[in-house]
Image (spheres, rainbow, N blue to C red):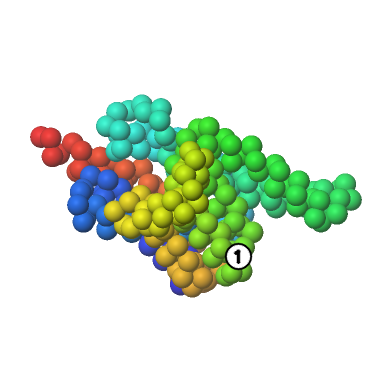
């Protein structure tokens, strides 16, 4: 599967997820469950893009700028107001994740080559430098928060190793179930009660059950080709396609806000 096809699939799943916010019943469950597949795909594509881009700084600048431009459409779509301090859009999560990939890649390389650190110690230092980025995602309340940054890190470290990659994606998918069990254990419930509650939540009508659908991104990721240049289009077409994906995020948010929030009230 070409990476561009994976991007299209991720965009379709994201669109379904955002439309699902304004529905109810079975349609809500279906669309929101399908939507869980999108972020792992974007996380994988970000990790691939990091290794293939000609300029990591420009890559980060494009993501961050698009995140700023998308914040008002994001707020209009999900809060109905221009300013909503409770959460910020997923492009800031991706930007922090890209910074984390830089830490995992460049800091160990610098320490081993310039400071004669052992590879293990240098890798540990790279991981430690990612902690502020994870905490920043939580503090800013970015979409998916610190878990999103951790998933991007996992995609960068294990993108071509199916077993550890699957493990990382499973832990991400099961985070809501783990939060339920952890909360009950913290409040004094027995392990059996916590486990029972966790299992009961693993249904599509519960947020924890829908989160598990993120694991379905794994087969698409494993099928994706690592060769970015194999898709048959020109350099100009490639650049146009690249910016089309950047524009899709704010444009689809405005469209969803218009058709699902504004027009029904007219």
State the residue at coordinates (12%, 35%).
265
199 sits to left or right of 191: left
Image location (x, y in percent) of residue 126: 72, 47
Can residue 64 be seen in the rendering of this structure?
Answer: no
State the residue at coordinates (50%, 51%).
191
Give the residue pinned by disc 1. 164
Q: Nearer the viewer, residue 15 or 31?
A: 31
- Look at the picture and state if 236 lies above or below 59: below
Query: Which picture quadrant has residue 86?
Result: top left
Image location (x, y in percent) of residue 151: 54, 53
State the residue at coordinates (46%, 70%).
219
Element type where label 1 sits in the image: helix
Q: Nearer the viewer, residue 229 or 45?
A: 45
Can residue 152 be seen in the rendering of this structure?
Answer: yes
Image location (x, y in percent) of residue 79: 30, 33
60 sits to left or right of 15: right
Q: What quarter of the picture does the C terminus occupy?
A: top left
Q: Nearer the viewer, residue 152 or 180?
A: 180
Query: Which picture quadrant has residue 35?
Result: bottom left
State the residue at coordinates (20%, 49%).
24
């Amino acid at each position: 599967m070409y990476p561009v096809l994976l991007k299209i699939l991720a965009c379709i799943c994201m669109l379904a997820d955002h439309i699902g916010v304004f529905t109810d019943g079975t349609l809500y469950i279906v669309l929101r469950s399908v939507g869980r597949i999108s972020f792992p795909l974007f996380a994988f594509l970000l990790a691939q893009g990091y290794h293939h881009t000609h300029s990591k700084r420009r890559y980060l600048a494009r993501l961050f700028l698009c995140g700023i431009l998308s914040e008002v459409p994001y707020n209009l779509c999900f809060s109905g107001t221009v300013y909503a301090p409770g959460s910020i859009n997923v492009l800031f999560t991706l930007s922090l994740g890209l910074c984390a990939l830089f830490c995992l890649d460049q800091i160990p390389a610098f320490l081993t080559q310039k400071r004669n650190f052992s590879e293990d110690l240098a890798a540990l230092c790279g991981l430690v430098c990612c902690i502020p980025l994870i905490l920043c995602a939580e503090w800013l309340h970015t979409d998916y928060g610190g878990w999103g940054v951790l998933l991007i890190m996992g995609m960068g470290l294990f993108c071509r190793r199916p077993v550890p990659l699957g493990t990382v994606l499973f832990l991400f998918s099961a985070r809501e179930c783990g939060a339920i069990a952890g909360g009950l254990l913290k409040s004094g419930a027995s392990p059996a009660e916590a486990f029972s509650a966790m299992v009961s939540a693993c249904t599509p009508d519960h947020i924890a059950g829908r989160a598990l659908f993120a694991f379905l991104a794994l087969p698409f990721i494993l099928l994706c080709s690592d060769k970015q240049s194999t898709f048959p289009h020109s350099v100009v077409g490639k650049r146009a396609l690249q910016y089309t994906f950047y524009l899709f995020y704010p444009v689809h948010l405005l469209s969803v806000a218009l058709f699902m929030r504004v027009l029904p009230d007219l």
